[in-house]
Image: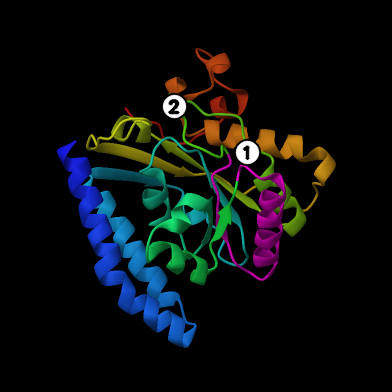
Amino acid sequence: MIRALFVTLVTFAYILIVGPPFLIYALLTRRTDALYQIGITGAKLAVWMSGIRMEIHGLEKIPRDRAVIFMPNHQSNCDPPAVISILPPVLVMAKQEFFRVPVLGRAMLLRGFIAVDRKHRERAIAAVERAVAALKAGHSFLAFPEGTRSLDGRLQPLKKGVFMMAIKAGAPIVPISVSGARKIMPKGQFGIRPGRIRIMIQDPIPTAHFNVDDRGALIELTRQALLRGLEPEEWPVGLSGEMPDSAADSDAPRPA
C-alpha cells in the first residue's frame, strides 16, 4: 500500500506541476505534441516507480503507414501506462471519469482523446462516430475492447463498439496481449506488487472485407489473437485446461 500511495502522490504532483506550462503552450499554439510527450514521460515514470518490468514482443508488427486501432486486454490499472508508453502516438478512448481530473482531463480533450459514457447509449454511439472520423483523418487509437478491467485476470467478452468503429473506418486492428498485470495491481485492491508484465503485439487484422453484419467473426479473430499471448489461467473459464487452436499453432515466445 505504501508503494501505491507513493506512486499515486508523485503522479498527481507530476500532472499538477509539470502539466500546466505545457497545457498553456498547447492552448496558445494549438500544438499538442509536447503535451503528449510529457504525458508519455509521466506514464513511463509511473511504470518505473511501480517496479514493473516489461517484456515486450512484436514491436516490428506495428503498421507505420496508416491509422490502426490497438486493442489490448485489460487486467489492471497498470495496463494503460505500460502499453501506451511503447506505442507510436495514439488517441485514446477512455471512460469519462478520467476527463474530470484537473489538468489531465483538459489535456486529453485538447489532444483529441475521446470520452466514453458507458451509461448512455446515444453518447457512446456519438463517441464511436467521432473516433471513426479521427481514424479516417489518420489518427491511430488505443482502446480496450473488454470495456473494463477483469476482476480475475481472465479475458472477458469483447464489446462490439470498438469493432463497429474499426469496420466503419476500415482500420486494421492490432491485438495486444497483456499478461501478468493483474498480479501487480489486482482490481479492487489499492496496492502495487512489483513484477513483470509480458506485452505481446499480435499480427494486424485487416477489416476492409468485414461489414457490420459479420462483426462477430472479427471479434472472434481478435479474441483468438489475444489468447495467443495469455497464460492458461488468464483464459476464459471455458477454455481452462485446453489450448485454443490458434494459440496452439502460434510460435509466440512463452516464458520458461
What residue is drawn where x is 24% and y is 37%? 192
Q: Which residue range is magenta in the image?
A: 118-145
Residue 28, above or below 167: below
Q: Which mark is residue 2?
A: none
What residue is drawn where x is 23% and y is 61%? 13
Q: In the picture provided, is 250 more to the left or to the right than 37?
A: right
Residue designated by label 1: 222
Locate residue 49, reporting x and y percent: 20, 50
Asked which quadrant contains residue 190, the reply is top left
Classify mark 1: residues with Cα within 10 Å, few (<14), some (14-19) or many (20+): many
Tell me, yes or no, if residue 206 can be seen here.
no
What residue is drawn where x is 37% and y is 62%? 102
Locate residue 231, reporting x and y percent: 43, 26
- Please, what is the three-letter code of the amino acid marked with disc 1? Thr
Task: Give the mark nearest the N terminus, 1 or 2.
Answer: 2
Q: 150 and 239: which one is in front?
A: 150
Q: Which mark is residue 151?
A: 2
Q: 101 and 114: which one is in front?
A: 101
Q: Kindly state the secondary structure of the residue where label 1 is placed.
A: helix
What residue is drawn where x is 21% and y is 52%? 9
Q: 243 and 170: which one is in front?
A: 170
Classify mark 2: residues with Cα within 10 Å, few (<14), some (14-19) or many (20+): some
Q: In the image, which is nearer the foreground, mark 1 or mark 2? A: 2
User: Distance from label 1 to label 2 (Cα)?
Assistant: 21 Å
Q: In the picture provided, is 42 more to the left or to the right than 221?
A: left
The number of callouts visible is: 2
